Each structure stands twice: as structure tokens, then as C-alpha cells.
Image (cartoon, coloured by chain):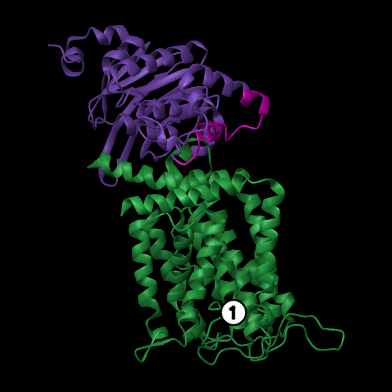
Chain colours: A purple, B green
Amino acid sequence: MLLEIDDVSLLYGRIQALHGISLTVDEGEIVALIGANGAGKSTTMRAISGIRPVASGSIRFDGEDITKLRADLRVRRGLCQAPEGRGIFPGMTVLENLDMGAYTRRDRAGIAQDLDRVLGLFPRLAERRRQQGGTLSGGEQQMLAVGRALMSRPKLLLLDEPSMGLAPMLIQQIFDIIVEINQQGTTVLLVEQNAQQALARAHRAYVLETGRIVKSGTGAELLHDPAVKEAYLGVA
Amino acid sequence: MTTVLDKVRSGREAVGDRWHHAPRWVRWALLAAVIAFFYALPNREFYQYLGPIPTPGANFTQVMFTVSIYVLLAVGLNIVVGFAGLLDLGYFGFFAVGAYTVAVLTSPSSDLKAMWPWLLAVPVAIALTMVSGVMLGTPTLRLRGDYLALVTLGFAEMIRIGAVSSEFLKGQRGFNQIPHPPGEFADGKPVFGVLDARPYYWLVLTLIILVVIGVRNLTHSRVGRAWISIREDEDAAQLMGVPTFKFKLWAFAAGAAIAGLAGALFAGKQNFVNSQNFELLNSIIILAAVIFGGSGNIVGAIVGGGLVAYMIERFRGIELFGVELYEYRFLFFGLVLVIMMIFRPEGLIPNRRRAAEFKDRRKEVTVGE
């Protein structure tokens, strides 16, 4: 197992946001975490990337217990998250943003190679390489966030709502790119409200409700599960 | 209204563009001219031709020394506020630590009776302010925004009240006979005397140049990139593997060290240090100066610190309808700040990135509504 989360609970002050979550991600997989607004999807991501400390439970990554490890050291272990929404650096240019993605690395040749790869995956970013991040459109910012996370050459890429606020065309495009990234060898854990798209692409998925995992299975299984259909896919 | 503002804005951008596109030698020549101007400034033979620039109500050379100290402080605070984005309301507290360290180690009225030479006390003052910066920063830099501002505010007041009431720090009686920096002319007269403020000004000016070169190199390195990323989005910085706490502490310590240096220079010139030198207002003025000039931009901080310190002194000795304008200096200062914040929140000479961050934040607010 690349990532193993066991019985993790997390508190925001006195409010319990996660109630004993357990999930696993195997090497080479795309795993999706779906659920409604406020179900705890982003909180789960924050626990994994280390932005929020967990109250109890354990997180293992690549055979190592990282439950108490600082967030920046998790990046060095190969775990990188693209934050949701406007999580890019608005005052830095596209190239500077991508450069920040490689902050933990010092292998210049490897960084240059990954930069080519990212610009190849996202031609829009290549066109706008000298433009400031804050001046990009929502979709471009999203691509930049994903590309920047890739620049750390992660073993596990965490994507928080990669399709949020995007036009349908762009949603399609960003999911295609996620699959392509995965096929190039990066394991992906993604959080999505857009359950249809996420389940269609993911190998496996978990359904999160009010801080608990209520269902899990392969993407195809959940896609055809009547309860999931009714609650998240908008068809009765 | 906006059209006028836009015109001013585009005009200034054109100046910026012209500067960036000018050949290297032109830029160097201009820079050398500016520096030469400021070295020449405190000479009466030079400033008497400058029309309204010399201050009517105060010795202009003394004023220029004060201005230079403020510029040095603004450059230091700019690291903390401008680069790392940490709101420090008690920056003058570090200045006090620097000045008092020199006073305690060198003055004959100190209980220590160490009576060190000034030069020996300077590195100790810098080191101690750095340590106090780390001590203050370690518990507080894990806090965010507002909390940090409050704690630093408390720190500066603590230092001041400690100075007022502690027997060791001599309160209002203060420390006297603090030695001047070393150096003698060929005829045996000291370079750094009591009457002539020019050598002190030149010393501070030279140190400002050195500090600016150091800070510039720092901001173009990995450290600088880390600071900027923290300022722009602390969570994202952490997600990219930047040890945010460590770099915030570094910014704090570096800023503190520069304030300590400024404090040591101040004590060495003034010859006398007491608790009245360190009012809270000073912290606010420097912070306002950095924001006024354009935080995040070294040139902005220099211009801001210089202009604010100079303008306050410029009011001295001017009477209007029988009212001494100096009495109302902070009223004008406040008014200018309010107007600035409405029309130009990014400061006089903003940082290119910083301007984009402001725009981004504004967008975020409107999206949230």
C-alpha cells in the first residue's frame, strides 16, 4: 500500500470533522473520494498533506508512519497536494509558480525535464508562462495548481476538487489529463463533487458523509449503485 | 477622477518600463548619481542651493541622521512585513534592545561598569536583538495575522515599560556618556564628535547600502522565494514543501538584527539613551512608512521611511495663522495615510507581485460575497 489511513479523526476546535476514517491507496491507482459539500473531503486531504493535525488514528505513507510529520517533510517524501480553488501564488508568473512546485528538489536536469512534461500536458500554461498567476482564468489556475504539484515529482498526487468552477469542456479536459498523469506512473487520490466524472475515471472510490466513510468500491460499482446514483449523480 | 489616476498610474509604469529597458550603464550611472547626491546632501555648501528642501526649524544635518536611521529601520521591517508578510507592530522594540545593549555595555552609568568601546558592543547588540527576535518569534509565529500583531505590540510595550521602571535600565534618568564610534583624523580630533552629525549620517548611509545589497541577494535566493510564497499563500507554500515556520522565524530574526544595528548606531551618536526614546508611536510610524512606500519593495521601503521621517521634521518651525504646524504633524500624516489607503493601497512604489496579490485578494472578497 502506498497510502494507508487508519481510523483518523480530526477536530476543528470543538467540532469533529472526521470520525474515524480509514482508506487505502495502492501504487498506480486513481482513487476518488466523493461526497457532498461539508462531508469532510477537503479536511481528509488536509489531514493527509499535514496542513491540519489529526486528533487520533494513523497515516502511513510508503511504509512510514507520517501521522506526526510536518507538512513540508511529507512533500519531500513524495506526497504533494494541489490545493482547491485559488491555491496558486497570484503574484508569481506561471513559470515561477511551477518553479515553486520543485522547491524541495535540487536536480536541475530532472526539474527541466518535468517542466517540459508539465508544459506539454498543459499547452495553455506554456502560452501564458510569463503571465502572473492571479491574472489567469479559473480553469488555467486549476491547471497551474495541478502542474505545480506535478513539479515535485510526487509518488502520490493529491487533487482537491480539480474540476471546481470549470466549464463542462474544461472538466472533461482536466479529467483526461489526470488519467494521462496516472498512466505516466503517478498515483492519484482525488476529491470531487463531480461524482460522475470522478467515478468514471477512478479505479476505486470512497463515499464520504458527515465525516464518515459510508461506502467504497470500484469506480464502476459505485457508478451503478442505486444509493450513490440518487444522492450524488442526480438521477433517481 | 479615475481617468486622472489611471493616467498617473500608466505614467509611472512607463517610468518603470523605461528604467527596466534602459541600458545597464545608464542604470548604473543614475544609481551612482543618486547615491552621490545623498552623500553630498548634509553639506551646507550643497544643501543651501536646494531651495525648500532643508528643514527651517531644525539642524538639517541632524534631521538627515534621523531620516537615515528611519530608512535603515524601514529596510529591516520590510523584510518582515513586505517579504514574509508578517504584521509586526512592535518593531521598534528591537531597536530599543539594540540601543540598550550598547548603553548597558558601554556607559559608565551602567551597573555593569563594563565600559566597553562602542565597536565591541555593536555585534553583541545585533546578536542579542536576533536572539530576542527568535525568542519572541518561536511561540508566536505559529499564530496567524492578528494574533502576531497583538503579541508584537505587547512586546514593544514590555520593553518600554521595562526600561521605564527597571532599576537596571535606569528609566528616565537613562545612560549617559555612551562612547562614539572610533576613528581619529590626522590632527587627533575624533571623526565621530558631538557637534557634527555628518560622519554618523555617512556611516548609516554606507551601512544602508551594504544592508540593501545583502537583502537584495537574499530575496533573489531560495530564502526570498520561500518568503514570497509564504506571504502569497501560506498553506500553498507548505504544500510545496516550504518549511514555513522556519522561514518566518528567519525573516523575524533578520529584521530584528537590522533594528538592533540601527539601535546601536543611534546610541553611539546620541551619547545618551533613556526610556523616552522608545515610544510606541515609533513602531507605528515605521510600519506606516513601509506600507506608504510600498511594502515588499526595497526601493519603496527606502522612499517610504525617508519621506515619512523627513516630512515629520519638515513641519517644524512653520507657522500658519499663528499655529505651529509641527504640533499637528501626525494629523497630516494620518490624513495622507488614509488618502493613500483609499487610492493606492499597494504603496507609492509597489512591488509588481504585491500589486497582483492585492488584486487577487479583492477578487476573492467579491467572489465570497
Q: Residue B297: percent from the left, percent from the top?
A: 53, 54
In the image, residue B54 sits, relative to residue A170, either above or below, namely below
Residue nearest the viewer, comparing A92 with A18: A92
Report the magenta residues as a range.
A91-112
Would you name the residue on which mark 1 appears? B100
Q: Is residue A52 visible?
A: yes
In the image, residue B241 sits, relative to residue A218, either above or below, namely below
Which residue is painted at 54% across and 35% down in the image?
A: A96
* The quarter of the displayed image where residue B190 is located: bottom right
Q: Can residue A1 be seen in this view?
A: no
Q: In this view, does B1 lie to the left or right of B139?
A: left
The N terminus of chain B, quarter of image? bottom left
Residue nearest the viewer, comparing B207 with B24: B24
Q: Residue B235: percent from the left, percent from the top?
A: 43, 41
Q: Is residue B81 left or right of residue A37?
A: right
Amino acid at circle 1: Tyr
Total labels drawn: 1
* The quarter of the displayed image where residue B35 is located: bottom right
Which residue is painted at 38% across and 68% down in the image?
A: B336
Q: Residue B144: percent from the left, percent from the top?
A: 40, 53
In the image, residue B206 sits, relative to residue A116, either above or below, namely below
* The quarter of the displayed image where residue A5 is located: top left
Q: Residues within 10 Å of mark 1 (few under 14, many from 20)?
A: many
Q: Residue extending furthest left?
A: A236
Asked which secondary structure carries label 1, the reply is: helix
The C terminus of chain B, quarter of image? top left
